[in-house]
Image (cartoon, rainbow, N blue to C red):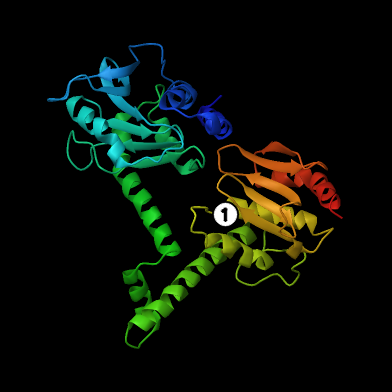
Amino acid sequence: MDFIEKLAALSTKVQSQKSVIETEEATKNAFIMPFISAVLGYDVFNPLEVVPEFTADVGIKRGEKIDYAIMRDGDIQILIECKRTNGELKVEHASQLFRYFAATNARIAILTNGEVYQFYTDLDAPNRMDSKPYLVSDLNDVDETLIPELQKLTKADFDLDSVISSAEELKYVGQLKRAIGSLFRDPEDDWVKYLTAKVYEGQFTQKVREQFRGLVAKASRQYLTDQVNDRLKTALGQPTGIASPEPQKSPTVESASAVEAHLESDDGIVTTVAETQGFQIVRAILCSDVRASRVSPRDAKSYFAIFLDDNNRKPLARLHFNRTQKYLGTFDVEKNETRHPIEALEDIYNFADVLRETLRNYA
């Protein structure tokens, strides 16, 4: 398997097994050791490559251990501190990483719970681990743009100079993306005031602030919806900007409100462009048998669900796109799900007959 396939296999393993992992030791064995060995390519049973329970006395701290140290040519290159899966990762959990980073020659430190991997280096001050990661990778939702950066840490392609040179841009781009997402979900006062001044000439009173807070949030969601729809129309070969005169053949505009509803979510659920496009393809397939408005989307953290009449008892399909390997989930008459791996969104059309048969089961 190539690097992407190995990462996808581990992602699937995490998804299927994390509910039964209850301890830090189990997390190491089930998820983190496979990440070190299968994904990064280091021999976890060779102490010249991977040292578990690595000990280095630091100042008055004696006998403290770091979970793993990855070695290259006799030098420590990567330090890894592990926490129990399903537990939240905070910078407070990295105290040992901070101390060991300064006491060794390591330039890369990783804090992980087996699902989320936070990568640190020393951009702010030499030989002092930064307080914020330069890269965050979530195996529940692998960002494909970060895969080349992860690959630079593998045994086969280890390139520390390239990692360090690109770390600063990765760090700030990642933080900016998260900040922009936060502003779109819950606009801060300064952001509301700045945008209000662009369109409103009156005095910026508290009443105006509260009025425009809602308007800014709504405009942000509609802007994202417009971008999603334009991307979808481009993918389907339709002109952007003006809705198709035959909505039954192109349900893009009709679904805009549904997409917007998901973009409003405050619970961390993010509807991706791929999920929206996949939903539109399923809806287009089913339009031959039912009105488009009856095919309803409902996003979740681990998959994107599609129902008939927004009814939990009438599942039509699931899009498992929060991983490198994408799957289309279809349902039989007993509502048992079967996952089909797909390489491209167009592959959904291969299951048109299955989707229509599922729909007819609810007639």
Q: How many marks?
A: 1
The quarter of the picture where the N terminus appears is top right
Residue 256's x, y, as percent? 62, 66
Residue 255 shown left or right of residue 186 in the figure = right
Residue at left offset 38%, top offset 84%:
200
Vertical order, 263 against 168 (above or below)? below
Residue 54 in the image, given as x and y percentages of width and height: 28, 18
Residue at far left of view: 60
124 with respect to 70 (left or right)? left
Specify the quadrant of the image occupied by residue 201. Answer: bottom left
Q: Quadrant of the C terminus?
A: bottom right
Examine the rendering and report whether any part of residue 337 can be seen.
yes
Q: Residue furthest bottom?
A: 202
The crowd level at tag 1 (other Cα within 10 Å; few <14, some 14-19, many 20+) is some
Q: Is residue 32 visible?
A: no
Residue type indicated by callout 1 = Val
Q: Secondary structure at mark 1?
A: helix
- Percent x, y for residue 8? 55, 32
**Image point (43%, 58%), residue name:** 181
Q: Which residue is mark 1?
A: 273
Left or right: 315 in relation to 169: right
The residue under the point 49% across, 24% down is: 30
Q: Position of residue 255 (x, y in %)?
A: 66, 64
143 in relation to 182, above or below: above
Q: Is residue 94 left or right of residue 282?
A: left
Report which quarter residue 153 is drawn in: top left
Q: Answer above or below: position of 121 versus 62.
A: below
